[in-house]
Image (cartoon, rainbow, N blue to C red):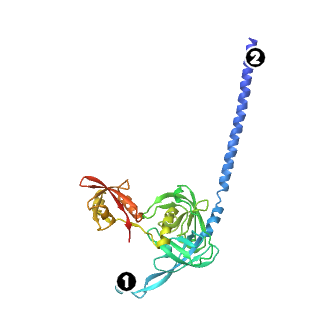
Amino acid sequence: MILNEKKLIYKLTFSFLIGIFFGILLIYIFDFFKFEKEIGEGQALIQSSYNEAIAKASPAVVNIYSDQLINRRSINSSRRFDSIFGNRKKQVKTSLGSGVLFSSDGYILTNQHVIGDVNLKVTVELSDGRKLKANIIGIDRGTDLAVLKINSSKEIYPSIEIEDSNKVKIGDVVLAIGNPYGIGQSVSMGIISATGREFDNPYSNYLQTDASINKGNSGGALIDINGRLIGINTLIRTSSGGSEGIGLAIPSSNAIDIISDLIQYGEVRRGWLGFSIDQQNLLRHGRLVVTQVIDQSPSNKAGLLPEDLILSINGSVSSYENLFKTFARSKPGDKILLEVMREEQILSIEITSGQSN
């Protein structure tokens, strides 16, 4: 009996010691992970300064001064006589914006509205303060993009690294670099609020950000925390005209496609199909019914006929938005597959896109 009691005491003592051992071990493990977490949070705090990203990208961001010719009505004239006789004076207006050097030989990407429609002269101010003349290589009003080239080709200019904007996620930290109100190069910080925004423009799928984008920031760089270009700041939708509101940037992946056309052709070559949709049918029933097919157009050659009902576009359910987006972004030579209903028969029609004028 005494022997059994001793064994029981030994077992209880052993269990107690084992419990203390594992308790101490758990405390050490908890403290270890807590320490690792604090280190991680400390590293995050250290990385909250983005000076390296800004130092990497900012030399490639330039100021752009554009002299534009605009019409201005004479002070002593009336609107009625202006409309009849065109009594308007020509005035030179200097527009201010930003741009981004994307190649070391002096090619610059900016917004078309920074350059204007009737341009007399473009001056580029580099990050070191030098002002140089630039030529307009090409503009695209559809995407609001323009490519410039600094006249001097002997110098090697700082250029920005371009990142694939398709990798950008909602919540990513971004930095907007530009020249707001002409006060000099400035940086604002925010996050990506949304991607794929169209805002009635089928040619772009904007990045939306809450980083401040003011007048003069147009054409500037939207970069990631590694200093790589992910977008071109283009506009802000606001009721006050200030920076508060919705900032939009043209994704770098879109811009790359535009750049190649502008450098090669001076314009963007878009596709053309040559048919129109019955607007009344669209408004009343939401159906895409072909109302006209232009003779000798790509659609005519493919066999599309008036009164064909479009069921799908490239395998996607037909809608006016899908139709407009597909055609607006098509290139000459692209294949577009339509599934249509004609006299209760479903047909597949492949159209090879032509070139739009």
Mark 1 — residue? Answer: 79
Q: What's under tag 2, amino acid-wise?
A: Lys
**Residue occupying the point 71% across, 25% down:** 15
Q: Residue at x 47, y 76 (%)?
A: 116
Relative to 218, residue 326 above or below: above
Q: Which mark is residue 53?
A: none
Q: The residue tagged with tag 2: helix, strand or loop? A: helix
In this rendering, the label closer to the viewer, 2 or 1: 2
Badge 1 crowding class, 10 Å Cα cut-off, few under 14, some 14 to 19, many 20 or more, is few
Specify whether 250 is left or right of 303. Answer: right
Tell me the distance, in whole angstroms, between the alpha carbons under discs 2 and 1: 115 Å
Q: Position of residue 302 (x, y in %)?
A: 32, 61
Nearer to us in this view, 339 or 54: 339
Question: Where's residue 10, x and y in %?
Answer: 75, 20
Residue 248 appears in the rendering: no
Mark 1: which secondary structure? helix
Could you say where residue 256 lies in the image, as x and y percent from the top left?
51, 65
Of the 4 image quadrants, the one containing the N terminus is: top right
| Residue 131, picture quadrant | bottom right
Q: Position of residue 68 (x, y in %)?
A: 49, 80
- For badge 1, the amino acid type reads Arg
Q: Which mark is residue 6?
A: 2
Q: Nearer the viewer, residue 7 or 168?
A: 168
Whether residue 56 sits left or right of residue 349 in the image: it is right
